[in-house]
Image (cartoon, coloured by chain):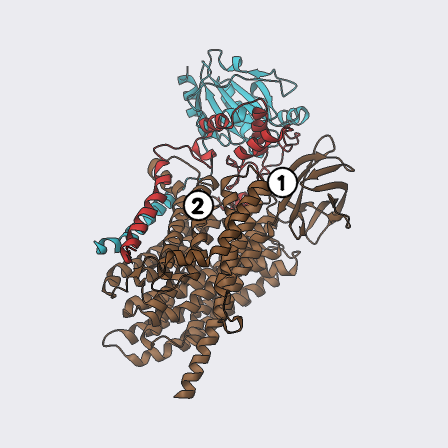
Chain colours: A cyan, B red, C brown
């Protein structure tokens, strides 16, 4: 019986080493994906954030047509490069709505003038209320919302041109 | 990747420029009611900042943490129970966001292992001791 | 030129480590050449000199701001103050690893030069084990984390050191902590040596004890310094967060404390043999696991170095070889070590056994809590966080129980004790504790049970820790008894500080305009003004606050919290302003300015929080007295033996 206990420490260590190896091989990274995917968008009503686009509310996202919801900000550097990808998506028939996080009107107008404006609606979320309700952890993030207002997928980080075909297909499928 | 990690290793600094927006109402201000503020504080020390390297939202300078603090204080002021707010956050961010994970099949071993350790250690030790009947 | 010399010194030191092992192995093995063992000790000393030289040369590169050395470029800047150029040498992965390896070498040399009481074979086996450990870490440095790598062409200026590290704490915390971590390698090598030669006995324990004590003292100092540093630098007044890296420093300390007490049982009563050897292996294993966790990037922490998983693989390989090897050796050999005596449950040995059990359980809890998120993620893919709620709820009560055992143990007799007699001996501390309980319940009703219990126990146990001195001739009491008393008293003092801070902390979070007065605890703090101010590599806005205390007519305190902006790397930090009073800290932090012109202020009144670190210092001092006492005694005994012979 005593012999058994002597081998416990080595075995426990071997187990731990195995776990370390698996974690090193597939590092988890620091991004926290949203757990709200599959749930409906919260009931929200955000004011218009930019001078050139109307406000955004839940009704806009549950009007029967699937959309891409893009959470961005003028102070977010990768968002500037993402604007071209969003414009491309819009050209391919995807409707893009935006939530501007913690942005002032003048900053946002300047950003849109500089980088283009692919959005149909832009809501201003100054206290991250909608972002938190979606389980978002920062900007930029994009969500595929289906026609009934249900969150179907989350993309963390800026979209790149390679993502466009897959996105278009997913939007079409999320009827 | 390495540079990204290096930047992230600075507490409270985001890799982006900061927003010029004013802070949310209760991000840096305590609730007027002391009991509500204490309840809010107890909750906030156990909610993890989702953009930081291991801090609770009450200790973090990150904008998102500030917004979460404001949200929590506002909801507690309206009378919502801290446990309900915690559940609400876990529904959106997963168990990771709470430093006190709810008891479930996944977390049960965590709480049982200390008892197991004490039991096994105690039994091993008891075998080495002479117990007198006085 | 300097960097190449440093690299050459490092290579030579590594080669000597290999030589050290080879000599030890072939000297000790059956049918080998015993005369080879005579060379082992000199080789160990030369190895230490070379690796210390390598470290000195790296420091010189930093002091010269030699930007052609890659490490100096990534982690230093010529405008940094001198002390941060010096200490910044180890404010990064490669430099701190070189520090680690240098201390490992010097520890080996110390064992080679100063260890006199071990028999020759075990001594050489220990040095051989030390060489094996060194070799792996040399390889890690030379092949995976070369501190002397060059950059061509040399950039004009460095990227600078993380501003949070630009603090005197950097000069003090890592070196003391590493001496503690790496000092445990000596105990590890002793244990491996003893397992190899099968000599686990009181002589072995008496030889190992001063090394464990020495490393433990530094580990205590390092953790205390780290806690205090985080407290005043991170700006939220917390002194322990159960962060994975903090836990990585606590685990070796828990193992070392258990080892310290276990080694006494082995030395005095020839018992707990397997447990002592196990703890010696575990203590350094925890140091190595800690190094792995901090540098591999698999756990997120504010303290973590920015390294990639590739290095993690290397360290993990070292871990598997060293820890796995030592634990396997343990399993194979310990069975053949003759079992020690069985003890009476009610006796000092019994109390030490219980102490061992509790410390080991707390160690297990900290280990499980720290690794659980990794385990869950590996098994189910789900992310989860384990933090203060878990650790406080599980380790807290056990720590309180441990503190009670700490009060009773030193007044118990060896071999056999009467429980009632112990209670009688502790009657006065128990009475003091009861009085304290009543007083606290009356003066501060509504306290949470854990801090309440902590405070009452701290007072009672503090009184009890003095009990071994009562009724004794204080002039003829050995120094190490004073050491024990001071260390135990330090634990009680630290616990009192922790309990007071949890229980009586007052915080005020407010947005104030210049000229307004805000209140925190018994203080009225007036916001006098804000001024711009500049330092060597930063600019700041400094707030001037004057604080007056209710019912106190002395001069008001002047505190100056700052919001700083460093230039390289561009970072904002907040410098807290702390006023240290006899009964606590007034802690002020300046935040950002709001749109309405008001400034965010966070203010704390933390009664008796200083006791936490004062207690830590007392524990370390107690250890130093004990070490001094034992070393003095063994020197005197050796001299008497020589004189008598």
User: Percent position (x, y) of residue C558?
Assistant: 74, 48
Answer yes or no: do the residues labelled 2 and 1 have beta carbons within 8 Å? Answer: no
Task: Choose top left, top right, bottom left or bottom right for residue C638.
Answer: bottom left
Q: Please tell me which residue lies in front, C401 or C220.
A: C401
Q: How many numbered markers are drawn?
A: 2
Host chain of mark 1: C
Q: Quick check: do tags 2 and 1 share a chain?
A: yes
User: Percent position (x, y) of residue B2?
Assistant: 49, 46
Q: CA distance from mark 2 to mark 1?
A: 25 Å
Residue C585, can we see it? yes
User: Percent position (x, y) of residue A99?
Assistant: 56, 23
Give the residue at the far top of this rendering.
A63
Residue indicated by mark 1:
C506
User: Percent position (x, y) of residue C546?
Assistant: 75, 45
Give the residue at the far left of this rendering.
A1
The reply, left or right, for residue C314 in relation to residue A133 is: left
Dot 2: few (<14), some (14–19), or many (≥20) neighbours within 10 Å? Answer: some
Give the quarter of the figure containing the C terminus of chain C.
Answer: bottom left
Q: Is residue C400 above or below residue C520?
A: below
Q: Please tell me which residue lies in front, C69 or C599.
A: C599
User: Looking at the image, is mark 2 or mark 1 nearer the viewer?
Assistant: 2
Q: Please tell me which residue lies in front, A69 or C613.
A: C613
Residue C147, can we see it? no
Q: Is residue A39 above or below residue B105?
A: above
| Residue at disc 2, secondary structure | helix
Residue C397: numbered disc: 2
Q: Which of the marked residues, 2 or 1, is nearer the chain's N terminus?
A: 2
The reply, left or right, for residue C335 in relation to residue B72 is: left
The reply, left or right, for residue A4 in relation to residue B104 is: left
Q: Residue at x 65, y 56 (%)?
A: C80
Q: Residue at x 39, y 65 (%)?
A: C264
Host chain of mark 2: C
């Amino acid at each position: 019986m005593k012999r058994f206990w002597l081998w416990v420490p080595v075995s426990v260590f071997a187990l731990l080493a195995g776990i370390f190896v698996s974690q090193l091989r597939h590092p988890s990274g620091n991004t926290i994906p949203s757990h709200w995917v599959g749930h409906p968008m919260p009931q929200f009503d955000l004011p218009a954030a930019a001078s050139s686009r109307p406000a955004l509310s839940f009704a806009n996202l549950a009007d029967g047509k699937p959309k891409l919801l893009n959470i961005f900000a003028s102070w977010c550097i990768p968002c500037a490069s993402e604007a071209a990808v969003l414009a491309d998506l819009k050209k391919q028939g995807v409707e893009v709505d935006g939530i501007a996080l913690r942005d002032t009107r003048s900053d946002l107008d300047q950003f849109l003038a500089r980088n283009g404006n692919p959005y149909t609606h832009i809501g201003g979320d100054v206290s991250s209320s909608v972002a938190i309700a979606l389980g978002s952890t920062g900007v930029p993030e994009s969500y595929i919302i289906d026609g009934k207002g249900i969150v179907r997928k989350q993309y963390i980080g800026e979209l790149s041109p390679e993502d466009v075909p897959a996105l278009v297909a997913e939007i079409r499928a999320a009827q | 990747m390495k540079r990204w990690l290096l930047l992230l290793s600075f507490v409270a600094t985001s890799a982006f420029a900061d927003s010029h927006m004013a802070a949310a109402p209760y991000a840096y201000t305590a609730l007027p009611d002391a009991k509500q503020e204490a309840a809010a504080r107890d909750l906030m020390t156990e909610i993890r900042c989702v953009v930081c390297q291991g801090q609770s939202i009450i200790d973090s300078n990150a904008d998102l943490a500030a917004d979460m603090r404001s949200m929590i204080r506002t909801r507690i002021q309206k009378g919502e129970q801290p446990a309900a707010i915690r559940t609400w956050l876990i529904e959106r961010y997963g168990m990771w966001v709470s430093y006190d994970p709810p008891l479930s099949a996944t977390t049960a071993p965590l709480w049982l292992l200390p008892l197991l350790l004490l039991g096994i250690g105690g039994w091993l030790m008891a075998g080495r001791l002479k117990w007198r009947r006085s | 030129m300097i960097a190449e010399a440093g690299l050459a010194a490092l290579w030579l030191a590594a080669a000597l480590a290999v030589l050290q092992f080879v000599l030890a192995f072939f000297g000790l093995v059956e049918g080998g050449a015993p005369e080879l063992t005579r060379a082992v000790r000199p080789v160990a000393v030369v190895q230490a000199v070379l690796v210390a030289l390598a470290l000195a040369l790296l420091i010189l590169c930093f002091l010269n701001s030699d930007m052609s050395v890659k490490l100096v470029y990534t982690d230093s800047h010529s405008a940094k103050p001198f002390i941060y150029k010096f200490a910044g040498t180890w404010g990064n992965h490669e430099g701190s690893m070189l520090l680690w390896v240098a201390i490992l070498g010097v520890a080996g040399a110390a064992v080679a030069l100063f260890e006199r009481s071990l028999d020759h074979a075990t001594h050489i086996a220990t040095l051989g084990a030390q060489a094996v450990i060194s070799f792996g870490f040399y390889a890690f440095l030379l092949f995976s984390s070369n501190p002397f790598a060059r950059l061509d062409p040399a950039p004009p200026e460095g990227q600078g050191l993380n501003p949070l590290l630009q603090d005197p704490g950097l000069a003090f915390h890592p070196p003391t902590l590493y001496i503690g971590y790496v000092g445990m390698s000596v105990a590890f090598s002793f244990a491996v040596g003893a397992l190899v030669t099968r000599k686990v006995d009181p002589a072995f324990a008496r030889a190992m004890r001063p090394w464990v004590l020495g490393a433990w003292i530094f580990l205590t100092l390092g953790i205390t310094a780290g806690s205090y540093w985080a407290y005043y630098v991170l700006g939220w007044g917390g002194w322990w967060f159960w962060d994975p890296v903090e836990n990585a420093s606590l685990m070796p300390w828990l193992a070392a404390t258990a080892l310290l007490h276990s080694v006494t049982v082995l030395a005095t009563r020839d018992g707990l043999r397997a447990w002592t050897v196990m703890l010696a292996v575990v203590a350094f294993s925890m140091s190595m696991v800690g190094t792995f966790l901090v540098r591999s990037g698999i756990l997120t922490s504010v303290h973590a170095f920015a390294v990639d998983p590739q290095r993690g693989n290397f360290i993990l390989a070292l871990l598997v070889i060293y820890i796995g090897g030592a634990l396997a050796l343990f399993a194979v050999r310990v069975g053949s070590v003759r079992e020690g005596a069985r003890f009476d449950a009610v006796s000092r040995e019994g109390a030490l056994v219980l102490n061992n059990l509790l410390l080991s359980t707390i160690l297990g809890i900290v280990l499980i809590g720290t690794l659980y998120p990794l385990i869950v993620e590996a098994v189910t893919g789900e992310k989860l966080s384990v933090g203060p709620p878990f650790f406080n709820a599980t380790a807290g009560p056990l720590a309180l129980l441990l503190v009670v055992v700490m009060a009773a143990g030193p007044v118990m007799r060896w071999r056999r004790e009467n429980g009632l007699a112990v209670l009688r001996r502790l009657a006065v501390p128990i009475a003091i504790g009861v009085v304290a309980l009543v007083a606290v319940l009356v003066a501060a009703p509504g306290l949470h049970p854990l801090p309440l219990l902590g405070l009452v126990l701290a007072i009672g146990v503090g009184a009890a820790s003095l009990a071994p001195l009562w009724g004794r001739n204080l002039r003829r009491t050995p120094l190490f008894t004073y050491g024990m008393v001071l260390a135990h008293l330090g634990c009680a003092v630290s616990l009192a500080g922790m309990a007071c801070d949890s229980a009586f902390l007052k915080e005020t979070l407010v947005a104030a305009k210049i000229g307004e007065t805000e209140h925190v605890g018994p203080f009225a703090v007036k916001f006098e003004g804000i001024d711009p101010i500049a330092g060597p590599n930063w600019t700041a806005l400094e707030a001037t606050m004057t604080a007056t205390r209710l019912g106190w007519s002395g001069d008001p305190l002047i505190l100056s919290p700052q919001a700083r902006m460093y230039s390289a790397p561009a970072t904002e930090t907040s410098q807290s302003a702390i006023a240290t009073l006899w009964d606590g800290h007034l802690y002020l932090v300046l935040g950002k300015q709001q749109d309405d012109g008001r400034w965010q202020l966070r203010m704390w009144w933390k009664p008796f929080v200083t006791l936490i670190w004062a207690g830590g210092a007392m524990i370390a001092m107690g250890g130093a007295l004990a070490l001094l006492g034992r070393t003095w005694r063994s020197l005197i005994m050796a001299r008497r033996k020589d004189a008598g012979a």
